[in-house]
Image: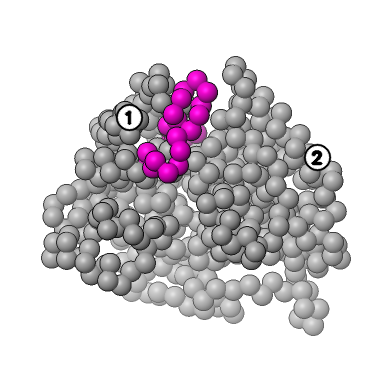
Amino acid sequence: MNNKKYIERDLGVLWHPCTQMKDHETLPIIPIKRGEGVWLHDFEGNRYLDAISSWWVNLFGHANPRINQALKKQLDELEHVILAGFTHEPIVELSEKLVKITPGNLSRCFYADNGSSAIEVALKMSFHYWQNSGQKSKTRFINLGNSYHGETLGALAVGDVELYKDTYAPLLMQPITVPSPDCYQREQGESCHDYSIRMFKHMEQALEKHADETCAVIVEPLVQCAGNMRMYDPIYLKLLRQACDKHNVHLIADEIAVGFGRTGTLFACEQADITPDFMCLSKGLTGGYLPLSVVLTHDNIYQAFYDDYEKLTAFLHSHSYTGNALGCRAALATLDIFKQDDTINKNRTLAKLLSESVQTLHDHPHVAEVRQTGMILAIEMVQDKQSRKPYPWQQRRGLKVYQHGLANGVLLRPLGNVVYFMPPYVITPEQISLMAKIAIEGIHLATSD
């Protein structure tokens, strides 16, 4: 069957995520038959380099033989079992490994199905902790401007990207929002480190004013991914941890997108040498294979729920597929690859190649900034470089880059006018050169009128 047939069948029954479906009257869907390494193959012999890891989830390539083998073996043993009152080998082993490799004293793992669900768990668990502890006034959360934490109502409420949030405003709780330390906004000549320190005053003021009613501060460490890949310095996290301790407020680290090596360390919090009260992980957790998420917390939180049944202090949040055995096995295989292949060290070379591949764009008249944190690189297209005046969003300049990429065998999916690379870690130097070449061509085309 060719691409056209699958497109017709798809449009007859599907409603795609994060999509204005009317676009597909002129923008064809790409049916994918198979994946191999960084490549996605359609039904007509075309292939596309997956420069965005299929929404940031794929770490070690499509159809990775080591993860495949682990899943095939697990399929013959156990596919899933209820996690209430039961357990299984993959989830015990995975939890032990996560406790060992995550920062500090994180000692308990609570599983869910996806990133948004993990955020819901962390929000509810923080709120419930304070209720169990007798501090009933703590009912609110502090977030950062331009943040994104998912699409379910709680996660959406503590985000701050208008495009996703505004429609549902009447349904959402109201967080206390402080300006982002996003270093794109720094003064000319000001370091990202100094700007992040300067911006922390807003968080300090919010905590001083609202600590008595605040359960937790929630942040995406180092990179606000859905917020146009905006980045900030680790010093902000260090100051935030100190302030949360001072004001008796929890810290939730949403490492769903930035965890598992994306920022250059296994977890972004490591770069500030801090431990959050809750760490949310998903996406790369299973190497891009299966939906699975986890919230790690420490024993002080756990003990606030540990009591006689009659006290009704238990955390009763649940998902049908919590701790799915296949997902846990994929995660274990993923962690094995990190260790066996010395991935974090190898990624330093790849990150350097990413940087070098787009050096010419630093002087481009319509590129305001090329920014990078580890294996995440972003290029911000603007109408005027000097003033950083953005293009009107209605012009959809990023869409032109996307279309040029597909026409030339590279899957780029810009966030508005921000083109970014977040490729699988198995990408080669030659593939980085191809990815950069097509992106640069696309940016020239998109900004040429």
Q: How many marks?
A: 2
Is 244 rendered above or below residue 215? above
State which quadrant residue 297 falls in: bottom right
* Residue 156: quadrant of the picture: bottom right
x and y percentages locating residue 45 in the rendered image = 13, 52
Give the number of the disc on residue 257: none
Q: Where is residue 84 in the image (x, y as percent from the top left)?
A: 58, 78
Q: Residue at point 53% right, 37% down?
A: 230
Of residue 162 and residue 438, the one placed in the foreground of this image is: 162
Q: Compare residues 395 and 180 and report the one nearer the observer.
A: 395
Asked if one can make out residue 390 in the rendered structure from this viewpoint, the answer is yes
Residue 69 located within the stretch drawn in magenta: no
- Left or right: 280 in relation to 13: right
Which residue is labeled 2 in the image?
A: 205
- In this view, the residue farthest toward the bottom is 310
Image position, residue 418 (x, y; %):
43, 37
Residue at disc 1, secondary structure: loop
Circle 2 or circle 1, nearest the eye: 1
Does residue 382 belong to the magenta stretch? yes
Dot 2 surroundings within 10 Å: few (below 14), some, or many (20 or more)?
few
The span from disc 2 to disc 1 (Cα, nearest Å) is 45 Å
Q: Mark 1 points at which residue?
A: 449
Three-letter code for the amino acid on which mark 1 is drawn: Asp
Q: Position of residue 180 (x, y in %)?
A: 64, 39
Quadrant of the image for the C terminus? top left
N-terminal of the two: label 2 or label 1?
2
**Which range of residues does the magenta coloring cover?**
372-398
Q: Residues within 10 Å of mark 1 (few under 14, many from 20)?
A: few
